[in-house]
Image: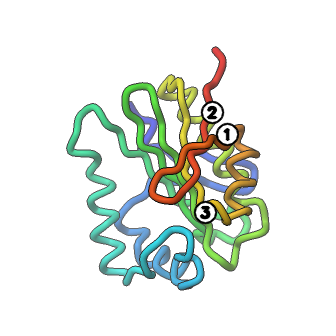
Amino acid sequence: MSHATEPSGTARLELLPLRPGHAAEMAGVLSDPALHTFIGGTPDTPEALRARYERLAAGSPDPGVLWRNWVLRDRTTGSLVGTVQATVSGGTAEVAWVVGTPWQGRGYATEAAGWLVAHVIEAYGVHTVIAHVHPVHHASAAVAAAAGLTATDELQDGEIRWELTPHR
């Protein structure tokens, strides 16, 4: 499948398959320690991020699991502003998004997450889309809701499970 190797996008964002060469710019995008309040960890160095991106770009070692990762490029400025990702397995896609602090509040996460959910349903025929959102991360909950997901009562690692079961 070529789904992971071709750029795609929305009106304002070009979604490019994540590559190790994106690490230096993305290290800056993800450098605000406050951003990691909800996503965990601390900002990676460009070298550490490159090593992580090399692993992601190589794909899952499990042939039954697809890793799909994209960087978000603002079409107007040409700057990277965040990432979206999907792990697809057995008809289920677990999705996530992150937008760097300077670009938050502009609707980029909502636009990218909406694209991502539609993409995994169309391209991979998934029957369930899942996201996990920290209970007090109201902005990310709003993104999940805008993408069509609904909060459940289930908690995993302290995060609320959001779910969409598309009707075919």
Q: Residue at x 56, y 29 (%)?
A: 121
Tell which tag, 1 or 3, sits nearer the viewer: 1
* Residue 25 point in image, percent of width and height: 49, 77
In the image, residue 148 sits, relative to residue 160, either above or below, namely: above
* Residue 146 point in image, percent of width and height: 76, 45
Residue type highlighted by circle 3: Arg
Residue type highlighted by circle 2: Leu
Q: Residue at x 46, y 31 (%)?
A: 92
Q: Which mark is residue 164?
A: 2
Tell which tag, 2 or 3, sits nearer the viewer: 2
Q: Secondary structure at mark 1?
A: loop
Q: Residue at x 59, y 61 (%)?
A: 134
Which badge, 2 or 3, is on the more N-terminal residue? 3
Residue that mark 3 sits on? 73
Which badge, 2 or 1, is on the more N-terminal residue? 1
Q: Residues within 10 Å of mark 3 (few under 14, many from 20)?
A: many
Q: Residue at x 59, y 56 (%)?
A: 133
Task: Determine the CA span between mark 2 and mark 3.
Answer: 26 Å
Q: Quadrant of the N terminus?
A: top left
Residue type highlighted by circle 1: Leu
Q: Residues within 10 Å of mark 2 (few under 14, many from 20)?
A: many
Closest to the observer, 156 or 75 = 156
| Residue 56 falls left or right of residue 63 | right
In the image, residue 118 sits, relative to residue 55, either above or below, namely: above
Q: Secondary structure at mark 2?
A: strand
Q: Which mark is residue 149?
A: 1
| Residue 64 falls left or right of residue 19 | left
Decide: marks 2, 1 in contact (CB < 8 A)? Answer: yes
Task: Determine the CA span between mark 2 and mark 1.
Answer: 5 Å
